[in-house]
Amino acid sequence: MTEAKSAALAELAVPSLSSSAIATGTGTDQFCLAHPLDSRGKPKESTSPHAKAGEIIGVVVKEAVREALRWQNGLEPSYTRGFFHALGRFGLTQERVLEYLQGELSEREFALLADNLQAVFYEPGVGASAHALAAVLDRVRCGTLPEAAVGEAVRQQVACLACSVAARPQSWPALYTALDCRDEDPLESILRAVALGWKTKWA
């Protein structure tokens, strides 16, 4: 049951409220089991995922958790593809991003962006790039990536993000060159990529 619950949260990339990690549950998670007593049957010694009963429990719990999150939190899979859902747990909230972009874009460019927030930040390519960056940042946090490789890994992904914002995949080499951010805070690189992508879109 716990494994199924955590799997549902991971699939929806539900952020933890106490760290930048993906949530695995909450402090109020509880399960209640009820089963009729029947002394004639042989008691089950295991309901692990290797047993049919365990498999059924896992499938049902995962479906129930996903449905509960849909009704309680509005966490449809399509909602979770957004830029802010992917990167908000690292501090890239809508407020922070817009504040940065207002200082980087012209008044006209910013007004156009503000009028099209949903279209920009929920665009599938932008969402894919944001989730790819979240995966890189998770690997950095967990120590999977060596420190020397982080800057280049982030640079490649922010170039993809800029291309997606600009809707110009053919501009990847130029945007990669422009985003030489290997010694920069990854979050600043992401912000700069969004600004550059939006400027490139209208250049």
Image (spheres, grey):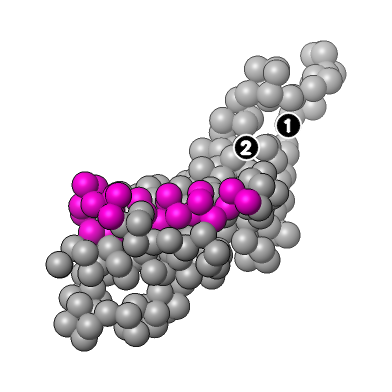
Q: Verify whether residue 192 appears in magenta.
A: no
Q: Verify whether residue 162 appears in magenta.
A: yes
Quadrant in the picture for residue 74: bottom left
- Residue 22 visible, this angle: no
Q: Main secondary structure of the magenta part?
A: helix
Name which residue type carries label 1. Answer: His
> Which residue is drawn at the image coordinates 39% and 69% (left, top)?
192
- Tell me where residue 12 appears, x and y as whole percent: 49, 48
- For label 1, the residue is 35
Say which of 59 and 96 sits in front.
96
**Mark 1 residue element:** loop
**Mark 2 residue element:** helix
| Viewport quadrant of the N terminus | top right
Quadrant in the picture for residue 2: top right
Name which residue type carries label 2. Answer: Ala
Is 113 located above or below residue 28 in the figure? below
> Which residue is drawn at the image coordinates 66% and 63% (left, top)?
19
| Chain part drawn in magenta | 148-174
Q: Is residue 27 left or right of residue 127?
A: right
| Viewport quadrant of the C terminus | bottom left
- For label 2, the residue is 4
Is 33 located above or below residue 81 in the figure? above
**Along the polypeptide, which appears first: circle 2 or circle 1?**
2
- Tell me where residue 8 appears, x and y as whole percent: 55, 43
- Tell me where residue 165 appears, x and y as whole percent: 27, 59
